[in-house]
Image: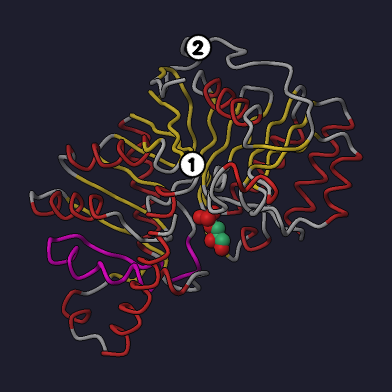
Amino acid sequence: MEPTWREGNRIQLLPGAEHYVPALLDALGEAEESILFEQYLVASGRFASRVISALCDASHRGVQVFVLFDAYGAKGLDKQDRQRLEQAGVVIREFNPPLSFRRGSIFSRDHRKLLLVDSKVAFTGGFCIIDEFLGEWYDVVARIEGPVVQDWLSLFIGLWQSQATKGAETAPTFEGARYSLEPWFIGSFARVIWGRGYRQQAIRFSLLQQIESAQQTICLCTPYFLPTPSLKRKLAAAAKRGVDVQLLVAGKGHDHPTIFHAGRRHYTFLMNAGVKIYEYSSRFIHAKYAAVDDWVTIGSCNFDHWSLRWNLEANQEVQDVEFADETRRLFAQNIAASEKIDPTEWASRPHYQKLKETMAGTLTAYLTRLR
Ligand SMILES: O=P(O)(O)OC[C@H](O)CO
C-alpha cells in the first residue's frame, strides 16, 4: 500500500478535551458495525473507564470491537480493565510485547493513535487514553470522513495481521476498502501517511519537502522538539528566504523536562535565521500538527528523532486552502496562550539555564543514537 491522495473528504479539527472527548464517546456510542481502536498510551483511570465502558457497550450490542495497544504504552492498563474488555467480547492484540523483543528493538513502539468507526469515520491526533488528556493537557484530533478513511482501515488491518502484534487470533472480517474510493463530499484532498523508524520515513520526508517549497507560512506545533539536523536546517532556510516560520513547542508543565531543555538548545540557531518561537504556557501542549501554506499534517508524529528512529507513526495530510486557514486560526489561538521567546532576552539567559540545555542535549543525543 502506498500513500495515495484522495478527493472528496471532510475533515474537522477537534481541539481540546472539550471537543474531542464528547465526539469520541458519541462515535463509540453510535457505532453499528465495527470499532477499530489503535492507541499508544493507555492507563487505567477515569478516561480509560469511560472509553472501556463505551467499547464494552458497543460489543454487547453486537458491534465488532478490535483494540490494538502498544504493549509498552498500555502497561498502565490494569488487569480488571483488560478483563472487562475481554469479557465483553472485545478482541485485543498488542504491538511488540516483551517476549517478542528478538523481532526488533524494545524501543520500537506503535505510537499511532487511531479510531475507526463503521469504516466511515476516523479520528487521529495526539490524544492518548490517560487522565491528563481529560483537560490537564491540551491536544488536537482530526475527525475524518471520506474515501481516505479506507486507507486508515487498511493501515490498521495491516498491522493487526502483522507478526509484530500478538494476542487474540480473531481478525476483522473485512479487508481494506469497504466503501467507494470516489469522493464522498465536495471537500478536501487528503492522504494517510505513515512511518516506521528508518524503514519508512514518509511523514518526515513529506514535511521536509513542504518546508523546502513553502512560499508564505510554516506553522509547526510539536511538544517534543528534538529536530533532526535536516528539519532544523530547512526551517532556518525557509525563514531566511522570507517565509513566516512559527514554531510552537510545549513549555509549562512539560512531562519530560529533559526533552524540554534539550529542545531549547536549538532556539538560538533558529531565531537567528528569523524563526519565531513560542512556548505554550497555559498548560502542557501535546498536539502534533503543522500547516505549510495550503498543506496540513496532523497525527501521532512528533517530527523528532524518536519518531524517526523507532516508532510506528501515522498522520493525516490535507491539501486544502480552507482547512489550512482553519488550522492556522487554531495555531493563532494556541500561540495566543503561549509565551514568545524574545531573542535579546534569550541571549542573556542565565548560565545555569544554558548548562541544563547542554546536559539535557548531551543525554538526549546519546539516547537518540541507541540502536
Ligand atoms: O509519545 P507521545 O507523544 O504520545 O506522548 C506520550 C507522553 O508524553 C508520555 O509521557
Q: Which residue is mark 2?
A: 181
* Crowd around label 2: few <14 · some 14–19 · many ≥20 (10 Å): some
Give the image quarter of residue 132: bottom right
Does 137 appear in magenta?
no
Horizontal and vertical percent position of residue 39: 63, 45
Name the residue furthest left.
Answer: 241
At label 1, the amino acid type is: Glu
Q: Could you tell me the amino acid type at mark 2?
A: Leu
Across and down, in percent, residue 179 comes to: 59, 12
Tell me the residue that label 1 is attached to: 313
Ligand 1: which quarter?
Answer: bottom right
| Contact flag, marks 1 and 2 (Cβ < 8 Å) | no
Q: Quadrant of the C terminus?
A: bottom left
C-alpha distance separating marks 1 and 2: 23 Å
Q: Mark 1 or mark 2, which has the lower sequence index?
A: 2
- Above or below: residue 186 compared with residue 166: above
Q: Is residue 321 left or right of residue 86?
A: left
Task: State which mark lies toward you, 1 or 2.
Answer: 1
Find the magenta span and give its range. Answer: 261-285
Q: Residue at x 52, y 21 (%)?
A: 146
In the rendered view, would you say 144 is above or below 242?
A: above
**Residue 230 coordinates in the image, percent (x, y):** 23, 50
- How crowded pointer 1 is (Cα within 10 Å; few <14, some 14-19, many 20+) is rated as many
